[in-house]
């Protein structure tokens, strides 16, 4: 089983008129996500499920990825800010061993969860970055970090 963690693309800054939940992607965030999605599709990355945080910027990122990869976005409250390894464990437990999963969410949650998954380490994920962790043990959940791609590298893969 492969777990893909895609940090949402660059989002508009918070203002007094919108909540953090409502912040959309910037045009640059949309463009970079489209490039990353095309690169993933060209490399035949095809998870069985695409789970997104309910926050607008994550849902927009997931919709772009889903369109390129031919996947329906499944919005999951577990992936909103505060996402932790126990929530990941529940999501993994609900699928088969041969089903890869992609998650679209937030910082600092993804680096924290990935660090716990791989047994420690300081993981840095930029907006629009992607990590792949291959699961080696399901209970308790443990894996190996295989990729950690910053958005500049994803841009170059298109």
Image (tube, rainbow, N blue to C red):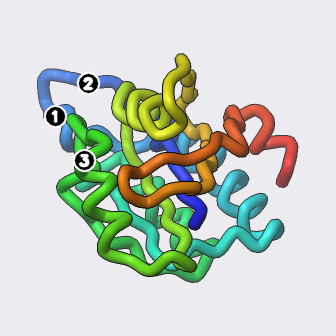
Location of mark 3 (residue):
86
Location of mark 1 (residue):
18
**x, y (%) of residue 104?**
43, 52
In-front residue for pair 113/73: 113
Using residue 38 as the reference point, say whether residue 6 is left or right of it.
left
Q: Which mark is residue 49?
A: none
Q: CA distance from mark 2 to mark 3?
A: 29 Å
| Crowdedness near tag 3: few (<14), some (14–19) or many (≥20) residues, C-alpha within 10 Å | few
Determine whether 10 is above or below 71 in the image.
above
| SS label for mark 3 | helix
In-front residue for pair 14/81: 81
Q: First in sequence: mark 2 or mark 3?
A: 2
At a point 24% along the width and 51% down the height, the residue shown is 87
Q: Nearer the viewer, mark 2 or mark 3?
A: 3
Contact? badges 2 and 3 (CB < 8 Å): no
Determine whether 123 is above or below 46 in the image.
above
At a point 35% along the width and 58% down the height, the residue shown is 52
Q: Quadrant of residue 24?
A: top left
Contact? badges 2 and 1 (CB < 8 Å): yes
Give the quarter of the figure containing the N terminus: bottom right
**x, y (%) of residue 16?**
13, 22
At a point 66% along the width and 60% down the height, the residue shown is 37
Q: Nearer the viewer, mark 1 or mark 3?
A: 3
**x, y (%) of residue 97?**
51, 76
| Crowdedness near tag 2: few (<14), some (14–19) or many (≥20) residues, C-alpha within 10 Å | few
**x, y (%) of residue 81?**
23, 37
Using residue 81 as the reference point, say whether residue 8 is left or right of it.
right
Location of mark 2 (residue):
14
Q: Quadrant of residue 125?
A: top right
Q: Is residue 55 visible?
A: no
Give the quarter of the figure containing the C terminus: bottom right
| Crowdedness near tag 1: few (<14), some (14–19) or many (≥20) residues, C-alpha within 10 Å | few
């Amino acid at each position: 089983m492969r777990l893909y963690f895609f940090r949402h693309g660059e989002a508009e800054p918070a203002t007094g008129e919108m909540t953090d939940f409502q912040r959309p992607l910037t045009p640059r965030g949309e463009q970079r996500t489209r490039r990353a999605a095309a690169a993933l599709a060209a490399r035949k990355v095809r998870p069985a499920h695409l789970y997104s945080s309910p926050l607008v910027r994550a849902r927009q990122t997931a919709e772009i990825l889903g369109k390129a990869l031919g996947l329906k976005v499944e919005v999951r409250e577990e992936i909103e800010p505060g996402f932790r390894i126990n929530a990941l464990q529940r999501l993994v437990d609900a699928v088969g061993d041969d089903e890869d999963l992609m998650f679209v969410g937030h910082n600092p949650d993804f680096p924290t969860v990935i660090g716990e998954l791989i047994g420690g380490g300081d993981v840095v994920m930029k907006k629009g970055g992607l990590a792949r962790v291959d699961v080696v043990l399901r209970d308790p959940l443990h894996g190996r970090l295989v990729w950690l791609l910053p958005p500049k590298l994803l841009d170059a893969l298109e």
